[in-house]
């Protein structure tokens, strides 16, 4: 196509493009956003990544150059046709042409390149190439050539923005040029990209220098992505764009505000000495090992009052349920804006009665359709650990939160419950963000994980370990013994007859259903709880069980899967549990005799052998039998007894050396920038489905059910609704009380 009179950066909403929709207008907007972001991020990046003054001083210029050059490749006939004519398929992505464009300008840009640290040019080009997380392009395309409008007035206008900031002579007069897209053409785009990649490839034998280089490149890439996000979304909605952005990014926490969160939670009571010790911890990395119900969360906010003062805070939980519970428990009317983030947070805000109200700041972003920027003005975020650790594999949710993450302190709760894979990403995160304050919390940490954290934290100034309050940790709380199913049922009936609350935890839904049938046959007051419900019904089930365990309520038997380990804040009078991995058993025991620091008496926990080891493997179950033998002798046991027995049976072996994840896309991609095919969590053995009967009822997220994969292969041809598989009518049997199962 011939060069249009105006070059567009995006498809126009009206008959005539607005300034921000044109290439020069968009370029200026992204450069303005980059300037604001750098002002906020650079000082924090210095401390977060332990950078030297030279790198920090250069960071702003490097990010600004990436913002200036990132979309010049849109000045091509293929892209301009695509934004004007729906359905036009481009033969090459514009990021590739932006790299080619920068290569054409290389000699002109040399005075700037030579003034930067040696990583600067590489970071600029890598960021230009990867700002849409789709480089190199893997889509098979049919185009054979592309024409670039180097001589267009809008290109000159975009280049002019650089002359106002950089020590450059007037831009060179370039003629329009047509490039081949054929791989074998020596003058084509694929060959140019290959040459640029070779020229930028940095060889170094210095491991420390290589880590530093990767960190700086990742920071540049992510800051450009954030600037492009803001420069694309905000100017059309906000007139005073840079000032509006700066004001929202400037929000931060104060120690006083965080201390008031604790005061509200404690209802005027003084913090325990244990909580004060956590709050006074001074190192960059603190590990808190304390049993369930010891007040770790309040201690964490006291810690944050020191370490998140003047920063942002991310409070990270292992599951959506624990994140929502933590948010509801602590973020009720704080002095600052807070936000819950996970895949079902919107449903929780709407359906959970005890949730704090959505902040006006968040509501405004939603009205402006700027939800992607939701963490930018919010100083306190409660989320799942995947939200933060997903950054390591270029997951967009985490990358969009980058302007907050780089300036934050972090609390990771229940780290013993992280899968091995997620834990390895936590280690890489600690290794990379060496200057970020981090608090790790757990009931009982496997020794191998303790050693892994200690090894990583040698680079962070060491690891401070704080244990729970001695009077609580050493208080006799549990009386464990093995039992048969018949003995367990006898104990359940006797406990209920005394008006008590009983929790029975099984390892599989199938086992829960079998026990439920037996309880219903015996006419016992029973409530089931597991994961195989529609999400809205699962929330109601959870509330039903928690409320039913309140002291004033009638006797109740709750039969649950391992979802009860962390999401149920209740105290049982009797616990029945199938044998499981030791950390899981200790977590389950945290639901027994839970609330008193020093109970009047120990209470019974009966351990039943499961019919099979599902869903655990042999490695997870190693040492379980020996641990049970040590502690399940009918004598009164404390949290300390359980932990010491675990350490005794989990002796070091050649196989338990846990390392940070070796390769992650955010740090190791360099020339390549993509959302990794790897997940930060192991693949689930379930699939989320929505019944065809429920499709018209509302949000698919609200009615989705985690299910085992359907029998046979027919499901591979089923329809999908968003990320959910649609189960044809009649294939899923569902009851709000019992949950879901596949019909045979």
Image: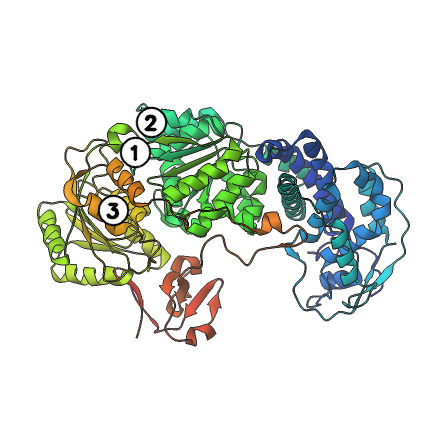
Asked if the residue under mark 1 is in contact with the one under mark 2, i.e. CB atoms within 8 Å, the reply is yes
How many marks do you count on the picture?
A: 3
Precedes in sequence: disc 3 or disc 2: 2
- Which residue is nearer to you in this view: 555 or 439? 439
- Residue 627 is labelled as 3
**Which residue corresponds to the image point at 39% horizontal and 62% vertical from the top-left?**
686
In terms of secondary structure, where does tag 2 sit? helix
Q: Which label's residue is closer to the chain start, 3 or 1?
A: 1
Tell me if 659 is positioned left or right of 581 in this view: right
Question: In the figure, residue 316 lies in which quadrant?
Answer: top left
Depth check, mark 3 against mark 1: the one in front is: 3
Asked if labels 1 and 3 touch by Cβ distance under 8 angstroms, the answer is: no
Q: Position of residue 275 (x, y in %)?
A: 35, 27
Q: Nearer the viewer, residue 142 or 534?
A: 142
Crowd rating for badge 1 (residues with CA inside 10 Å; few <14, some 14–19, many 20+): many
Disc 3 versus disc 2: distance between alpha carbons? 28 Å
What is the residue that sits farthest to the front in this orientation? Answer: 654
Identify the secondary structure beneath mark 3.
helix
Q: Is residue 420 visible?
A: yes
Disc sitting over residue 274 in the figure: 2
Task: Pinpoint residue 616: horizontal percent, then vertical percent.
Answer: 33, 57
SS label for mark 1: loop
Nearest the viewer among 390 and 579 is 579
Inter-mark Cα distance, 3 to 1: 23 Å
Q: Earlier in the sequence, mark 2 or mark 1?
A: 2
- Residue 200 position, x and y percent, is 74, 49
């Amino acid at each position: 196509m011939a060069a249009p009179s105006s070059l567009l950066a995006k498809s126009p909403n009206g008959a005539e493009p607005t300034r921000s929709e044109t290439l020069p207008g968009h370029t200026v907007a992204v450069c303005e956003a980059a300037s604001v972001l750098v002002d906020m991020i650079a000082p924090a990046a210095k401390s977060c990544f332990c950078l030297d003054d030279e790198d920090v001083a250069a960071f702003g210029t490097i990010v600004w150059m990436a913002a200036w050059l990132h979309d010049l490749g849109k000045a091509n006939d293929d892209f301009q046709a695509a934004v004007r004519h729906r359905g036009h398929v481009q033969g090459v992505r514009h990021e590739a042409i932006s790299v080619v464009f920068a290569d054409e300008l290389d000699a002109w840009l040399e005075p700037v390149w030579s003034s930067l640290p040696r990583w600067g040019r590489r970071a600029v080009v890598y960021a230009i190439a990867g700002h849409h997380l789709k480089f190199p392009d893997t889509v098979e395309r049919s185009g054979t050539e592309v024409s670039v409008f180097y001589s267009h007035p809008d290109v000159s206008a975009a280049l002019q923005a650089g002359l106002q900031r950089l020590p450059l002579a007037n831009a060179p007069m370039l003629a329009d040029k047509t490039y081949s897209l054929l791989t074998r053409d020596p003058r084509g785009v694929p060959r140019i990209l290959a040459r640029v990649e070779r020229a930028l490839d940095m060889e170094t034998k210095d491991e420390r220098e290589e880590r530093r280089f990767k960190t700086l490149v990742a920071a540049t890439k992510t800051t450009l992505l954030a600037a492009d996000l803001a420069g694309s979304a905000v100017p059309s909605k906000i007139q005073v764009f840079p000032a509006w952005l700066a004001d929202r990014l400037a929000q931060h926490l104060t120690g006083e505000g965080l201390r008031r969160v604790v005061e509200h939670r404690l209802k005027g009571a003084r913090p325990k000495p244990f909580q004060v010790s956590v709050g006074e911890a001074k190192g960059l990395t603190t590990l808190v090992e304390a049993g369930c119900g010891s007040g770790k969360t309040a201690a964490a906010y006291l810690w944050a009052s020191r370490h998140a003062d003047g920063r942002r805070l991310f409070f990270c939980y292992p599951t959506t349920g624990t994140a929502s519970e933590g948010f509801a428990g602590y973020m009720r009317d704080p002095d600052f804006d807070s936000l819950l983030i996970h895949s079902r947070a919107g449903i929780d805000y709407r359906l959970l009665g005890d949730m704090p109200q959505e902040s006006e700041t968040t509501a405004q972003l939603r009205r402006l359709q700027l939800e992607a920027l939701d963490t930018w003005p919010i100083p306190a975020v409660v989320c799942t650990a995947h939200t933060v650790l997903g950054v390591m594999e270029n997951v967009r949710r985490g990358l969009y939160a980058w302007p907050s993450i780089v300036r934050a302190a972090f609390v990771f709760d229940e780290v013993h419950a992280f899968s091995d894979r997620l834990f390895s990403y936590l280690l890489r995160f600690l290794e990379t963000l060496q200057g970020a304050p981090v608090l790790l919390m757990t009931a009982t940490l496997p020794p191998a994980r303790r050693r892994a954290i200690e090894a990583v934290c040698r680079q962070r100034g060491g690891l401070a370990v704080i244990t729970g309050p001695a009077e609580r940790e050493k208080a006799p709380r549990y009386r464990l013994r093995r039992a048969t199913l018949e003995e367990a049922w006898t104990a359940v009936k006797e406990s209920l007859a005394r008006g008590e609350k009983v929790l029975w935890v099984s390892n599989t839904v199938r086992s829960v259903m079998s026990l439920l049938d037996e309880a219903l046959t015996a006419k016992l007051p029973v409530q089931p709880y597991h994961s195989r419900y529609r999400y809205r019904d699962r929330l109601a089930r959870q509330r039903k069980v928690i409320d039913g365990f309140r002291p004033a309520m009638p006797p109740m038997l709750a039969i649950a899967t391992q979802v009860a380990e962390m999401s149920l804040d209740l105290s049982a009078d009797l616990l029945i549990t199938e044998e499981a991995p030791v950390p899981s058993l200790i977590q389950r025991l945290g639901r027994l005799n839970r609330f008193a620091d020093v109970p009047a008496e120990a209470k019974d926990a009966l351990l039943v052998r499961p019919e099979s080891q599902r869903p655990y493997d042999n490695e997870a179950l190693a040492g379980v039998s020996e641990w049970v033998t040590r502690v399940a002798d009918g004598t009164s046991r404390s949290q300390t007894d359980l932990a010491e027995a675990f350490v005794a049976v989990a002796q070091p072996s050649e196989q338990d050396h846990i390392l940070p994840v070796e390769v992650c896309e955010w740090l190791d991609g360099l020339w390549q920038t993509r959302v990794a095919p790897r997940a930060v969590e192991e693949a689930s053995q379930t699939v989320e489905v929505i019944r065809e009967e429920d499709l018209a009822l509302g949000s698919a997220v609200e009615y989705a059910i985690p299910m085992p994969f359907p029998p046979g292969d027919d499901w591979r041809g089923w329809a999908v609704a968003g990320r959910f598989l649609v189960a044809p009518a009649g294939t899923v049997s569902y009851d709000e009380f019992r949950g879901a199962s596949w019909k045979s």
